Amino acid sequence: TILTVLLIMELYGLSSSFIKRHYFVNKRMTWNSASKYCKTHFYDLSTFTTEKEEQQFLEDAAHQPADAWVGLYNQSGVWKWSGGENATRITWDTANKQPEDDNCAFLHKGYKKLHDIDCNSQYSFFCMNISEFVLVRQNETWEGALQYCRKQYNDMASLSSLNMMDSGLEKSTQAETEYVWTGLRYLAGDWFWVDGDDLDYKDWYQNEQPQCPAKNFHCGALDKKTRDWIHKGCEEKHNFLCSAQAVPPAVPQTTVHGTPPVPPTNPTNPV
């Protein structure tokens, strides 16, 4: 079976400084197996615990290719998110008599609403990662900042969407330098994010992407005054933004015969 993982969305979650990034995984598993897979390769099954998150998730999942599990399960008559918190609002497909009397939830491809079903059914699923930008208030060259971020956190910050740009700007307000290094780099005729994110979203100063920047001006930073990207000399020393990944919760025990998943005894929460 070919595994296809497709990044479909990102949105703020947990607090304004955290970013959830959701992925559709085109591999059929039971709910519990999907949960283990997400906690091994990502953070957890996808959750959307506020109205804003739910609306954004449902909009951005509009082109999902198949029915897919989400991180929602029933324990002793109470619906909970995979992190263990009670689900206070759920967009069930009430027009189709949902929920019924099962213990795990999936997003229906056609109706774009949640259905419940036996947890031992096999579906594709949504996983999520949760990350946070960290401002490092010490002056480094771009290369020095890259090495620091990869040693102390995960990588340099990628501002590859409006949400991530907003988060980066928020963090950068506390910087002690006018410019703040990001993970934006120019090599072999192209600008790119060092963590591999696509460069679809752009926010260059005056919307002018440097096509052939002068020698050594091959590193991208945030300009605190203009609130845009700017290319700077890579040997200049500035504060910088790193990306830190939240630690996944413990993997739950295996379920049997469609019973609800057993939550971890001491889940590790990012906040």
Image: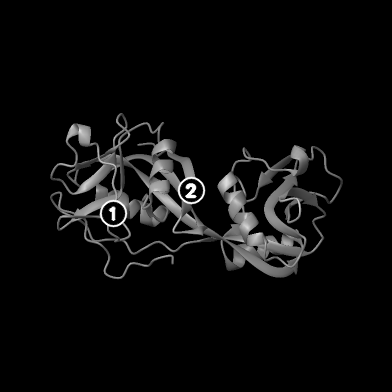
State how far apart marks 2 and 1 are (Cα): 19 Å
Name the foreground residue: 37 vs 81: 81
Vertical relation: 269 (above or below) 41: below
Helix, strand or loop at mark 1: loop
Quarter of the figure that contains the C terminus: bottom left
The furthest residue to the right? 214
Name which residue type carries label 1: Thr
Q: Could you tell me residue 160's position as x and y percent? A: 60, 45
| Residue 221 placement (x, y as % from top left) | 73, 53
Q: Residue at x 42, y 48 (%)?
A: 53
Q: Which mark is residue 265?
A: none
Task: Tell me, for residue 88, which label it has, or none.
Answer: 1
Q: In the rendered view of the protein, which quadrant contains the N terminus?
A: top left
* Horizontal side of residue 147 vs 10, given as left or right: right
Give how far across and how far down residue 18 sits, in percent. Answer: 50, 58
Q: Position of residue 205 (x, y in %)?
A: 76, 44
Q: Nearer the viewer, residue 85 or 251?
A: 85
Mark 2 or 1: in front is 1
Q: Around disc 2, counting alpha carbons within 10 Å, would you say few (fewer than 14), some (14 to 19), or many (20 or more)? A: many
- SS for dot 2: strand
The answer to whether the residue labelled 2 contacts the one labelled 1, judged by CB atoms less than 8 Å apart, is: no
Q: How is the model colour-coded?
A: one colour
Q: Name the amino acid type tagged 2.
A: Leu
Tag 2 residue:
11
Is any atom of residue 189 visible in this view?
Answer: no
* Left/right of residue 190 with respect to residue 48 in the rendered view: right
